[in-house]
Image (tube, helix red, strand yellow):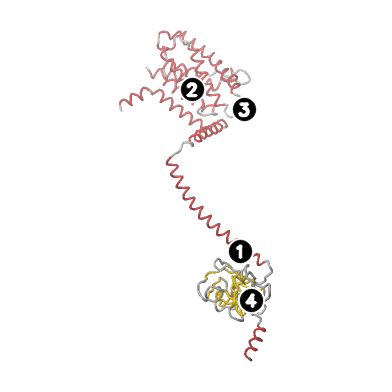
Amino acid sequence: MKTLGLFLLSIKEYLILSLLIVVSLILIFSNDNSQVRFLRAVGVGFVGAIQSGMSAVPNVFEIEKENEFLREKNIELSNEVSALKEAKLENLRLTKSLGLKDKNISGVVIAKIVNKSLVQARNTITLNVGESDSVRVNMPVITDDGLVGRIVSSSSNYSIAQILYNRNLSISVKVQRSRVDGIMNYDGAGNLIINNVPKSADVKTGDVIITSEYSNYFPAGIPVGTVVEEGNLDNLFKKVILKPSVNFTTLEEVFVLRHLPEKERLDLENSYLKKQ
Amino acid sequence: MYITSYLKYAIAFAVLIVIQVSFIWLIAISKYNITPDLVIVLVIYLGYSRGHIAGMIAGFITGLTLDILSGSFIGLSALSYSLAGFISGYFHKQFTGESSKNSPVIGIIFMCTLIANTIFFVIYFQGSSIPFAEIFLKYIVTTTFYTSVFGLIFSLIFNRFDLKKSF
């Protein structure tokens, strides 16, 4: 302590000089004239140059902190990228759907599937549209790829539709190329089958199947699927297996067609059947 | 004894400051209004006769007083005068020696004034478009020479009447 005191005493002139210089500089920099502004700018430039040079030297603590920050930012950005990808896919689907809307199919309601089953014999999907959206029982459900099914139940804001993979749904179809008619059903074992196709009928693998004019519930010409296999059912009829146009596994949005069976036609057909 | 001595210095400084602030313009030369710095001469003489500490503290106080009275650049004269007083303190041993009468006081005044003026004018002209060479020749050198002339007069008076004993 004594040594330090003696040392400080030996350099007292320099200590006092330093103090006076510091006080003078503080006074100088407390001015607000152009000279001081220039000196401040020079000072900032000088300090900036030093800091720039020093930035090349790695600071372990800063790097650790920066790493932590970057990791957090990375997670945040990954989540954002994931959300953006999801939004992009949704955008693509909706854009595609809007393309369908442009095809002059009037009276469609866009619906989102909120629940679906694909493993039962009577598969259905639940849509987020209902009677408040003018959705009624028996309206067809489609996508831009083709037929999905038919509404079988509706509430105010939700509705349930039978899809092609439902044993209770039978659809009158025809082969687009050869105009051969038939009834399409789900066999409950994973296949869509067209029954009642005569053995001599012109049906080939790859033929496109569409809804027929004979259908009461579906407008004619909606793609249903393509023939993937055709073989003999018995001596009179063929067994035609279809691959649906719609990929039900990835299905998320659909259109409900505001199309209902013609009442007059239904009444006439029903009264005739009763007379039989 | 010291108190009386410092009081004399204080009175001398007060007189010189009044002259510097109020009347020095009467002897300004050239279109650049170059004036001698009478106060710094006494600061240098004080540092020379009393050492570093006396020189720089006197320089700081008188410089700050001049800054306040001029009101333009607070702290600038305080800085340059402090350094002038400090540097002149390096020649303090010569003052106490036998050869003090023959010591080149005028040289010390010139050197210290040159340093103080350089600091003063370089900072004062910061941000202006005047090149350093022009500042050096038109302001620093001329002011230093003009001040040194008065420094020479002072030193002659001091030596002639041996005033250093009275201080």
Of badges 1 and 2, the one in the foreground is 1
Of badges 1 and 4, the one in the foreground is 4
From the top left corner, tell me how far across and down residue A125 is, in percent. Answer: 54, 72
Crowding around mark 4 (Cα neighbors within 10 Å: few <14, some 14 to 19, many 20+) is many
In the rendered image, the quadrant that contains the C terminus of chain B is top left
Of badges 2 and 3, the one in the foreground is 3
Asked if the residue under mark 3 is in contact with the one under mark 4, i.e. CB atoms within 8 Å, the reply is no
- Identify which amino acid the numbered label 1 is placed on: Leu
Badge 1 is on which residue? A94
- Identify which amino acid the numbered label 2 is placed on: Tyr
The picture quadrant where one finds residue A265 is bottom right
- Check the image and report above or below for A202 versus A22: below
Q: Nearer the viewer, residue A13 or A166?
A: A166
Crowding around mark 2 (Cα neighbors within 10 Å: few <14, some 14 to 19, many 20+) is many
Q: On the same chain: label 2 and label 3?
A: yes
**Residue farthest to the bottom, as pictured:** A275
